[in-house]
């Protein structure tokens, strides 16, 4: 009786007097080399015995096994994946989504990474968790790898202050070069974490503490992302950085009280400077106005004095010309004008030589003008 190619002898019992090969493909533990050795031994035994049936069955078994071996190279790639084909362990090509074929193991094998799943690494506030989403057809399963991410988040700023920066990095496999990710990076999450921390320290060292705490956070995230991507491209890591998200930076907790004191002192300083600036803006224009006013008064006084002096000179010269022509008359006129100016507003008694010889001229004092009568009240009696 001929032995079954599946390694089981018919027993005459059960399902039709013999066993059947497992349905749905190869056995769970498939040893191709051992089966080929057994098939070749059976063929050689049949040839020695001169059995044509045994030889034909052996050839059919070999053909079936070869077809199954070739069929094992068919594999499927999902829309969010790429198939990286290796030939004898060396990168050969990258296949797109859909049904694809590679030469069966051990000639070629395929690794199928997910190039759309986004992974996250947290710095200064959690664990860095890697979920690369890679599977190998029929032989490779994805696994989550966790590495400690509780790193030191205290960083030195450009003005030599210490700031506590926590941030998150989102990354995925580069779809253009997935083979770089598979073969050039051993622990992606740890590599991303180290590069992120180095890039962030470089960017923080370029900025001041005031800018980091207020307006420069979005620019810091963009600069960190650019530096990380440049590093990964230089090392051909096959990693694409999609985003860098900063949590609110703050000063270290041991010095938060002192920092608040400094901020209050700075606010008091700004308030004092504002008050002083207001006083300056009030007093300086006023002083400038008073100075201009004094200058204008001095100019007016100067003009008036010069004009008066020139008028006096002109009057003196006119009097002098008259004096030259008529000295007695001019002298008497000057005397009378001078006496008029001196005696003006004083009580006067005129003493002269008249015919009677008394020499005193009486002066009639005139009374002061009568006051106007008071107005009568409306509707009153006289």
Image: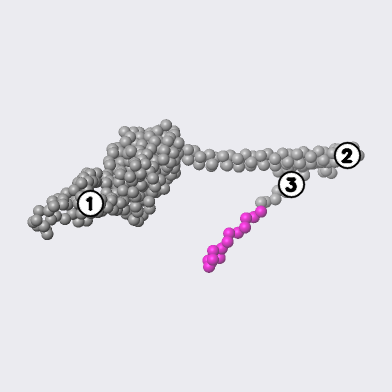
Instruction: Quote the CA–CA distance across marks 1 and 2.
Output: 168 Å
User: Magenta residues?
Assistant: 369-382
Which secondary structure lies at badge 3?
loop
Q: As drawn, is 346 to the left or to the right of 36?
A: right
Residue 103 lies within the magenta run? no
Q: What kind of element bears circle 2? A: helix
Q: Closer to us: mark 3 or mark 1?
A: 1
**Distance between the Cα atoms at labels 3 and 2?**
37 Å
Task: Name the residue tied to disc 2.
Answer: 321
Locate the C terminus and report the quarter of the image it occupies. Answer: bottom right
Identity of the residue furthest to the top in this view: 160
Q: In the current view of this chain or complex, which residue is farthest to the left? A: 13
Residue beneath the point at 37% across and 41% down: 90
Residue at 60% x, 59% y: name it.
373
Residue to which mark 1 is pinned: 55
Q: Residues within 10 Å of mark 2 (few under 14, many from 20)?
A: few
Counting from the top left corner in percent of width and height, residue 308 is at: 76, 40
Residue sitting farthest toward the front: 50
* Residue designated by label 3: 363
* Place of residue 190 in the rendered image (x, y in percent of width and height, measured from the top left): 33, 38
Label 3 or label 1, whichever comes before in sequence order? 1
The answer to which image quadrant residue 321 occupies is: top right
Q: Which label sits in the foreground, 3 or 2?
A: 2
* 263 with respect to 330 (left or right): left
Residue 370, picture quadrant: bottom right
Indicate which disc, 1 or 2, sits on the residue closer to the N terminus. Answer: 1
Residue 57 rendering spot, x and y as whole percentages: 22, 53
């Amino acid at each position: 009786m001929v032995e079954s190619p599946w390694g089981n002898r018919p027993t005459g019992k059960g399902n039709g007097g013999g066993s059947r090969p497992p349905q749905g493909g190869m056995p769970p533990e498939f040893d191709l080399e051992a089966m080929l050795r057994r098939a070749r031994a059976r063929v050689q035994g049949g040839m020695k015995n001169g059995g044509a049936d045994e030889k034909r069955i052996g050839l059919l078994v070999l053909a079936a096994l070869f077809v199954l071996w070739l069929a094992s190279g068919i594999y499927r790639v999902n829309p969010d994946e790429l198939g990286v084909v290796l030939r004898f362990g060396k990168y050969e090509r990258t296949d797109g989504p859909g049904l694809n074929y590679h030469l069966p193991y051990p000639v070629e094998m395929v690794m199928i990474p997910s190039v759309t799943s986004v992974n996250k690494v947290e710095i200064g506030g959690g664990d860095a968790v890697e979920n690369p989403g890679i599977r190998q057809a029929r032989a490779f399963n994805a696994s989550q790898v966790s590495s400690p991410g509780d790193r030191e988040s205290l960083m030195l700023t450009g003005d030599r202050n210490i700031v506590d920066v926590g941030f998150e990095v989102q990354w995925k496999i580069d779809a253009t070069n997935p083979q770089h990710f598979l073969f050039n990076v051993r622990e992606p999450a740890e590599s991303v974490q180290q590069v992120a921390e180095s890039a962030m320290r470089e960017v923080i060292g370029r900025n001041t503490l005031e800018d980091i705490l207020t307006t420069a956070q979005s620019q810091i995230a963009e600069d960190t992302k650019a530096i990380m991507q440049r590093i990964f491209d230089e090392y051909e890591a096959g990693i694409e950085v999609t985003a860098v998200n900063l949590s609110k930076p703050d000063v270290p907790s041991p010095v938060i009280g002192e920092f608040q004191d400094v901020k209050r002192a700075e606010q008091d300083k700004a308030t004092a400077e504002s008050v002083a600036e207001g006083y300056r803006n009030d007093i300086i224009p006023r002083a400038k106005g008073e100075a201009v006013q004094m200058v204008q008064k001095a100019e007016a006084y100067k003009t008036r004095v010069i004009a008066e002096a020139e008028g006096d000179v002109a009057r003196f010269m006119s009097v002098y010309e008259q004096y030259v022509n008529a000295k007695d008359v001019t002298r008497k006129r000057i005397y009378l004008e001078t006496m008029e100016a001196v005696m003006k507003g004083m009580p006067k008694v005129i003493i002269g030589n008249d015919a009677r010889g008394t020499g005193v001229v009486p002066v009639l004092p005139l009374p002061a003008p009568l006051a106007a009568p008071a107005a009568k009240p409306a509707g009153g009696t006289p």
